[in-house]
Image (cartoon, rainbow, N blue to C red):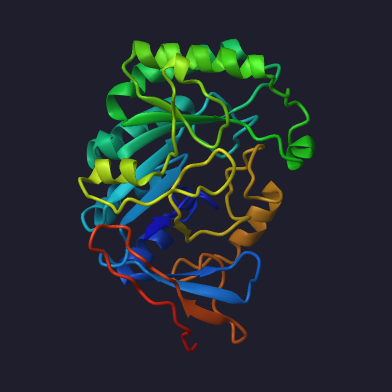
Amino acid sequence: MIINTGARTDTVQFYAKWLLKRFEEGYVLSRNPLFPNKVTRYELTPDKVDCVVFCSKNYEPILADISKITERFHTYFHYTITAYGKDIEPGAPSIEKSMDTLKRLSAIVGKQRLAWRYDPVLLTEKYTIQTHLKTFENMAKELSPYVDRCIFSFVEMYKKLETNMPELIPMTDTDKDNLAKGLGKIAEKYGLYIQTCGTNGDYSRYGIHSSGCMTLDILGGANGILFKDLKHKGTRQGCHCIESRDIGAYDTCMNGCKYCYANKNPEKAFENYRYHDPDSPLLLGHLKETDMVQQGAQKSYLKGGITCVQQELDL
């Protein structure tokens, strides 16, 4: 089983104390976003978790204590650093500060377990193709010695963006091709492995690999472990990632990114933060009498792994 800590929210940046305590106590509760009274319990122990995957825009809050997790679990880290400023990503640190933190993280966990995410790539009058390529080159020059790979994707034009980002300029196929060509050329210049994820289209002619960002090959190679030969269904079109279990919650990320898919609106995340208790096994609030708790199915993907049979628990 793969545990994902950062798909629904930036757990590392805003809930580091809670995250560390969950691993210390050895379990976590996750509320079903579609059926809120259904809660799943996952054991956070090395015999039940094959790998812990992190994704954040700021690892500073957890740097001093991350070894408490890395010394016990196989891990992999995604660090998102883009070209955007506070106008697009209000809660994210500056590019310079983010790159410095990435280098410090790399020194702790090893470059083989760290991927730089430059996504999503989007266009506005301020963030043009030329701006992206100039910024990406400056960052690639700095970061290539410290990361396993770079992952990028083009922004998904879902309906919510029409309200949240009226300044967004829809990308044409030519725009995407020019961006891919430029990114590929820069990556080659600095010896940086580059790939897409969640993006349709073949850009292999520019040296860009098409693969999931969280595959068993990536996780296994980074940690020196062998997984079973399993097909990756992915989570959406263009995605080839292995199935994972997210322990976060929607509408809780206070980065306020305009392109965010996990928040209904930025204000909702700040409102929900009032219900966060670092000592609770749930990210938000506490168990209620009406909640139905079940043990999550924790099937191992490792060769010779074990299975935890799903069963109902009494509150």
Q: Residue at x 78, y 30 (%)?
A: 166
Front in this rendered view, residue 270 or 265: 265
204 horizontally vs 100: left or right: right
Question: Within the image, what quadrant is residue 207 found in?
Answer: top left
215 horizontally vs 8: left or right: left
Specify whether residue 280 is in view.
no
Rendered location of residue 283, percent (x, y): 51, 65
Q: Residue furthest bottom?
A: 314
Q: Residue at x 22, y 58 (%)?
A: 72
Q: Residue at x 51, y 28 (%)?
A: 82
Vertical order, 139 against 253 (above or below) = above
Specify whether residue 226 is in view.
yes
Rendered location of residue 11, percent (x, y): 47, 53
Q: How many marks?
A: 0
Rendered location of residue 277, percent (x, y): 50, 68
Q: Quadrant of the N terminus?
A: bottom left
Front in this rendered view, residue 223 or 291: 223
Vertical order, 248 against 294 (above or below) = above
Rendered location of residue 117, percent (x, y): 45, 33
Front in this rendered view, residue 251 or 40: 40
Question: Within the image, what quadrant is residue 103 found in?
Answer: top left
Vertical order, 70 against 186 (above or below) = below
Q: Residue at x 62, y 39 (%)?
A: 257
Question: Within the image, what quadrant is residue 281 found in?
Answer: bottom left
Vertical order, 311 against 253 (above or below) = below
Front in this rendered view, residue 44 or 48: 48
